[in-house]
Structures are given as structure tokens and as C-alpha cells.
Amino acid sequence: MMAFLDTEMMDIVKADMCQNIMPKYFDLKSDSDFTFTSTGDGYSIFLIPSDTAADHIHIGESYYNDDKVKEYISPDNCLILSDMDMKTFANTKTAYISLSLQITDESKFDMKDEYLKKVEAMIDEYSAASDFGGNYHYIVRRTSDGDTELKDLDATEVYVINGEKITFDPNEERPYSRFKEAIAEKAGYDISEK
């Protein structure tokens, strides 16, 4: 039940943001209204709303974070999908959005600061919808198509948990994973492996 609610919530929020928030800042095209990826003139945007709650449960013989699972799906606290939108999502302590803007057209590389300001304005709107400042991650980068894969030439990356900017050790192998774990941990989840 928890995983089902989580998946449905992400789809609803993704649709709300793609239809009502992103068009204020970007002129985008996509294959469908609710895809994770949209394209603009010389850039692509990847928007992923997610919830860390379901990442820290074990389904099988036993649960860990059993109390949190019960709380998440209880009639008193259960998500009401018909009421879900970006604002409700932004006020969910275990939820976050991740946004990546990749500038792939070299003729648009000098527009990185302009794109960054638009991303920051969109993120500010998301953050303002939250009573606690929200959880989010964004990255704006110039990329070059190398011989085998895209390579970052220049990136601005920000992580925010409960409205506070978090800095991860640049030598850490998995800052994005640590970001997700820190959100769950601050929401009272046991993130240790069992």
C-alpha cells in the first residue's frame, strides 16, 4: 500500500509541476505531458519528485521502520491522492524534488547563468509552498557529448533539506544517495541496513 501511494503521489506531483509550474519558467517540449524529461532549445530538464519513506522499509518476514509504515498508511495520516498537488508534496517531510538542467548545445553555453536563475526561481516557488522550506536538489550544467558519454564541463549543484542548504564532501562517492538518506533520517526513519 505504501509503495502504491508513493508511486501515485509522484505521478500526480510530476503532472502538476509539468503543467502548472515549469511553463512559467521554461518553454519546453516533451513526448507526453508527464514524462520525467522535457526538452527546450539547446537543453533538457529532468524533474523527479520522490519520497524517501518507501526506501527504508523491508517487505518480507519483518519490517524495519514498522512504526513509520503504520503511520504512513494509517487512516489518520494516509495520503489523500485526490488532494495531492505540488504544495501538499512540498509539505511532506520525506518528499523531495530533484531537478537537473543540462545545456547540451554549445551555442547556449553562455546562457548558463540565465538558466540557473530560472531554475532557482522555480525552486523558490516550490520551497515557498512548504511550511518547513522543503527538500530539494538541483543541478545546472553544461555537458559535452564525448566519445562514449556526456561529460560535465561545468556544474552548479545544490542540496537542501528542511529548508537548509547541505554541503556534502566533494570526495564522497554518493552525495545524492546520502542526501536521500539524510531526508529520511531527519524524518525519523532508521536508515541502517538490517
Image: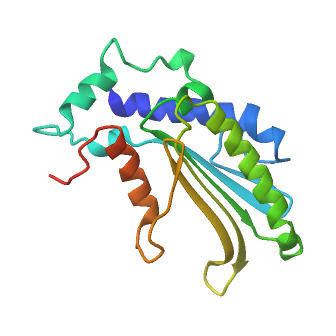
Which residue is more in the foreground, 32 or 81?
A: 81
Whole-percent x, y for residue 8 in the image:
49, 30
- The quadrant where residue 140 appears: bottom right
Residue sitting at 23 percent across and 44 percent down? 190
For the point 46% across and 60% down, which residue is it? 176
Residue nearest the observer in this picture, 181 or 84: 181
Residue situated furthest bottom in the rendering: 147
Residue furthest left as drawn: 61
Is residue 69 left or right of 142 when viewed as pictured? Answer: left
Front residue (pair 172, 39): 172
Which quarter of the rendering shows the N terminus? top left
**Residue visible at 39% across and 43% down in the picture:** 52
Image mark count: 0
How far across and down, in percent of the image, does residue 43 sit? 78, 62
Residue lying at the far right of the rendered structure: 107
User: Which residue lies most toward the front here?
Assistant: 164
Colour convention: rainbow
For residue 178, side relative to residue 160 (left or right): left
Q: Determine the residue positioned at 86% across, 47% down.
A: 27
Image side of residue 72 versus residue 15, left or right: left
Query: Residue 22: x percent and y percent?
Result: 75, 41
Q: Is residue 128 above or below residue 119?
A: above
Q: Position of residue 71 (x, y in %)?
A: 28, 23
Q: Nearer the viewer, residue 84 or 114?
A: 114
Say whether residue 143 is left or right of residue 127. Answer: right
- Relative to 70, is 145 above or below? below
Which quadrant of the view contains residue 122? top right
Please say if 1 is above or below 105.
Answer: above
38, above or below 141, in the image:
above
